[in-house]
Image (cartoon, rainbow, N blue to C red):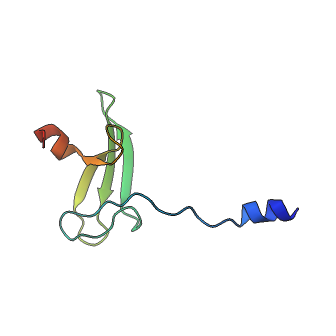
Amino acid sequence: MIRTLKKLFQKKPKQTTFIYCEKCRNELCSSDSFVSDTYDEKGDNHILYKCSKCGHVCDYNFDVAPVPIKWSELRSGA
């Protein structure tokens, strides 16, 4: 029973992904900035964040690398 209670009240996992707004440097993952997780007609993943401070919208791809990459950088080849 104690083991079951411990599992119910375990601490939240530590955040390991950090994305910052390119306009105001607000951290997006932990500031309720997530908007949507969708796929386009080509099957590419788009994760949208809207900054909770300045309102800037960013589009990221989490599928092509071990870190999130902005779609604008993928398209430009940067």
Quadrant of the rendered image containing residue 22 = bottom left
Q: Is residue 33 above or below residue 70?
A: below
| Residue 6 in the figure: left or right of residue 15 | right
Q: Nearer the viewer, residue 72 or 3?
A: 3
Residue pictured at 59% horizontal, 64% vertical:
12
Image location of residue 39, percent across then percent down:
35, 35
Q: Relative to 10, is 23 on the left or the right?
A: left
Q: Residue at x 39, y 45 (%)?
A: 37
Of the 4 image quadrants, the one containing the C terminus is top left
- Determine whether, in the image, residue 27 is placed left or right of residue 23: right
Quick one: which residue is furthest to the front in this view? 66
Asked whether, in this view, residue 53 is left or right of residue 32, the answer is left
The residue located at (80%, 64%) in the rendering is 5
Q: Position of residue 57 (x, y in %)?
A: 24, 57
Q: Residue furthest right?
A: 1
Residue 64 lies, in percent from the top left, at: 31, 37
Residue 10 sits in quarter: bottom right
